[in-house]
């Protein structure tokens, strides 16, 4: 029996992960692969956040820089200019909102948390900014650590693994040792679907997601409308909701506790159906 961590402490607010939750994606970017350019002003941002909260999102994940394949870096100042007004506006309008800041820069993480963000979501797992781990330790907030081979500009140029699941597990174990030594208490693992992985790697990873449960840490699945769906179904991201929903159920059955999504209502429905399946399992065993 594996007992994953059941709660995470977001600046004094405990989030219950004994049952799966949804993280809604809010990209304050002009060029994200699905929703780039949709939320360019405060009114659009607040309308989308209200929609996601109403539909059941527990966390709103705010990112100011696209990490789609081939994307380039923007400056720290530009990243701050994009996300800080959004964080402040959201917390003014919806003060109980739990915000995650999607950044790999320690300075951005620090300023966002000071402004009210409750988690740091780092696609580089500390590899981009050597100050990130110690910054997260000082901030005392949960840290979402994602695996990526390479960087967004080059990650999809022939990624190679001998065993993708085993290599990512070893990567996490090494990084966890560093984080624990600094006193970071709450860590969430994101295997990084689509980040330096072929379609085959992604499905192997999804099929073996349960292996990461041996860390006893919560697992985040970021599958929403990604190329691992689009390429198999031969559809654009705008038509990938049905495929996303199908794979979300697999992720939950494999042990995911957080679904990072563009479409909150549909993800919440998947969780509701998953719960019914789990209830049926318990009934069958009695």
Image (cartoon, helix red, strand yellow):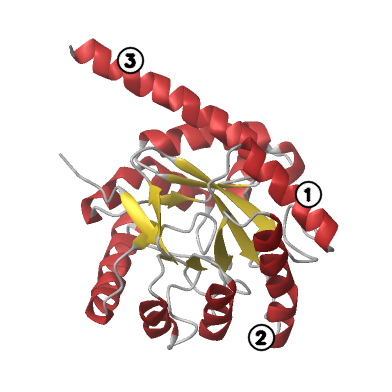
Identify the residue at horizontal 52%, vertical 29% (top origin).
Answer: 270
Residue 22 drawn at (x, y percent): 52, 44
Q: Nearer the viewer, residue 52 or 74?
A: 52
Residue that extends furthest to the left in the rendered view of this protein: 1
Note whether 163 is above or below 3 in the view shown.
Answer: below
Q: Nearer the viewer, residue 223 or 70?
A: 223
Note whether 236 is above or below 175 in the view shown.
Answer: above
How far apart, in angstroms, are the residues tagged by discs 1 and 2? 26 Å
The C terminus lies in quadrant: top left
Which tag, 1 or 2, sits closer to the chain's start?
1
Q: Which residue is mark 1?
A: 47
Can the viewer see residue 243 in this picture? no
Q: Nearer the viewer, residue 118 or 238?
A: 118
Residue 190 drawn at (x, y percent): 43, 57
Can the viewer see residue 18 in this picture? yes
Q: Which residue is mark 3?
A: 280
Task: Classify residue 210 as left or right of residue 142.
Answer: left
Structural crowding at the residue carrying mark 1, measured as other residues with C-alpha within 10 Å and reported as few (<14), some (14–19) or many (≥20): few
Identify the residue at horizontal 28%, vertical 70% (top origin).
Answer: 176
Q: Which residue is mark 2?
A: 76
Residue 140 drawn at (x, y percent): 38, 73
Give the quadrant of residue 207. Answer: top left
Pair 1/2: label in front: 1
């Amino acid at each position: 029996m594996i007992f994953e961590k059941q709660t995470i402490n977001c600046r004094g607010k405990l989030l219950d992960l004994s049952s799966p939750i949804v993280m809604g994606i809010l990209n304050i970017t002009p060029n994200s692969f699905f929703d780039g350019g949709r939320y360019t002003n405060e009114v659009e941002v607040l309308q989308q956040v209200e929609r996601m909260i109403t539909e059941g999102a527990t966390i709103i994940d705010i990112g100011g820089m696209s990490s789609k394949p081939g994307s380039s870096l923007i400056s720290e100042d530009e990243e701050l200019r994009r996300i800080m007004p959004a964080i402040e506006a959201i917390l003014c309008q919806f003060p109980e909102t739990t915000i995650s800041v999607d950044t790999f820069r320690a300075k951005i993480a620090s300023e966002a948390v000071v402004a009210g963000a409750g988690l740091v979501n780092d696609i580089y797992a500390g590899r981009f900014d050597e100050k990130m781990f110690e910054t997260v330790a000082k901030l005392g907030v949960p840290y979402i650590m994602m695996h990526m081979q390479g960087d967004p500009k080059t990650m999809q140029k022939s990624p190679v693994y001998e065993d993708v699941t085993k290599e990512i597990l070893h990567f996490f174990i090494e990084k966890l040792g560093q984080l624990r030594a600094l006193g970071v208490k709450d860590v969430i693992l994101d295997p990084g679907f689509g980040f330096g992985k072929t379609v085959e790697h992604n499905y192997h990873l999804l099929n073996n997601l349960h292996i990461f449960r041996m860390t006893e840490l919560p697992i985040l699945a970021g599958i929403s409308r990604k190329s691992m769906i689009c390429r198999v179904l031969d559809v654009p991201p705008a038509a990938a909701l049905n495929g996303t929903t199908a794979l979300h159920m697999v992720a939950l059955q494999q042990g995911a506790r957080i679904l990072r999504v563009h479409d909150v209502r549909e993800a919440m429905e998947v969780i509701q159906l998953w719960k019914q399946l789990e209830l049926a399992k318990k009934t069958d065993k009695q």
